[in-house]
Image (cartoon, grey):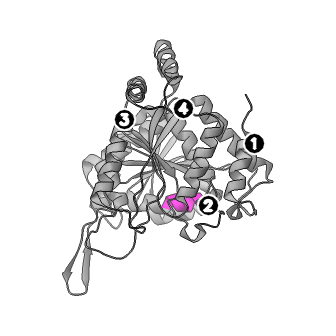
Amino acid sequence: MAAGSGVRWLTRVVAARSPGAWRGLSTSASASAASQSQAQDVRVESAFPVTMLPGDGVGPELMHAVKEVFKAVSVPVEFQEHHLSEVQNMASEEKLEQLLSSMKENKVAIIGKIHTPMEYKGELASYDMRLRRKLDLFANVVHVKSLPGYKTRHNNLDLVIIREQTEGEYSSLEHESARGVIECLKIITQTKSQRIAKFAFDYATKKGRSKVTAVHKANIMKLGDGLFLQCCEEVAELYPKIKFETMIIDNCCMQLVQNPYQFDVLVMPNLYGNIIDNLAAGLVGGAGVVPGESYSSEYAVFETGARHPFAQAVGRNIANPTAMLLSASNMLRHLNLENHSSMIADAVKKVIKVGKVRTSDMGGYTTCHDFTEAVITALPTS
């Protein structure tokens, strides 16, 4: 599809209709009819530019599935593809800056997992973390929802996990204070704790959710998590219609396994969110079925909810594209392409509900390619 100045102008039209990170959390009904008509007229001639980062592992295969499905429904999106990898000799400051430049220009991106090696090579902060910090992608949102027709131990689940992902335990501040003694600093600030708490309560309000649970370990980390908890409690007072609860992280893990239905929206610091994301994803089918997204005040990045490169599956054509396709659908909703978004999400859910086409992680034998083809077949015909 053709891109250029018209593309950039179209992006600004959409941003003006629903500014900042909250574009994906507001409905198109909030925009005026005139703005909608104007944007639709431009879409006929142009496309939304979106930055794509395939990432490592099965990321490129999943992105291929997204592109094939988008092509099948003529989605007016043009992907600007960049490659950044610490394990494929495709990582450099230049590549990072090119990626950041593209994301800052387009405001919207879809990304795969950038695998982070465990070996220390002089830089503590991974490219993954540096990317999120430079764009200030402070809020990670993972909507954990059961898929109709796919039975797990707990069915009909519907909960949201919101994590602050620019500080906390992942602050990359480690040093050897004495031989054989490593100090790893966890950073909790009032400003960022209040910001993520407000984001969680705003999300609950916009989405019609009734309860927010702050997850912490303030009984042990009395100052750090104590500050986070205090900020959540202060923000909660501004939202009297939303029920507020607190829960210690270890108890939260147990409660999620025993009775996940008690939760609605959960908000927490960085490491806890990383753990809970994966635990909750396992409740509804695993890393292959849960979409995710990250927000700053300006940018929106769409990705899988449980970040796994699934390196052992590379080249075997067995990856499950469900999570990435649902993330792509959420991205289209963020761009106010509601019709395309619904078509893709409905087709994915239809394939899973029928149950004849499932990848190995869902107990089937279907390849990634065949699952993608099944989704394309399930799309409504014009």
Where residue 14 sits: x, y (%)?
A: 43, 26
Which SS class for mark 1?
Answer: helix
Instruction: Please give left or right for residue 61 compared with residue 78 in the image.
Output: right
The residue identified by callout 3 is 238
**Span shown in magenta:** 276-282
Q: Amino acid at mark 3?
A: Leu
The residue identified by callout 1 is 377
Q: Quadrant of the C terminus?
A: top right
Instruction: Please give left or right for residue 250 compared with residue 218 in the image.
Output: right
Q: Main secondary structure of the magenta part?
A: helix
- Mark before the other along the chain sequence, 2 or 3: 3
Q: Is residue 119 visible?
A: yes
* In-front residue for pair 151/290: 290
* In-front residue for pair 196/139: 139
Where residue 378 sits: x, y (%)?
A: 75, 41
Q: Amino acid at mark 4?
A: Pro
The residue identified by callout 2 is 286
- Would you say residue 280 sits in the magenta stretch? yes
Residue at the location (65% across, 59% down)? 285
The CA span between labels 2 and 3 is 35 Å
Residue at the location (58% across, 40% down)? 329
Residue at the location (35% across, 49% down)? 99
Could you say which disc has been placed on residue 76 in the image?
A: 4
Disc 1 packing (10 Å; few <14; some 14–19; many ≥20)? some
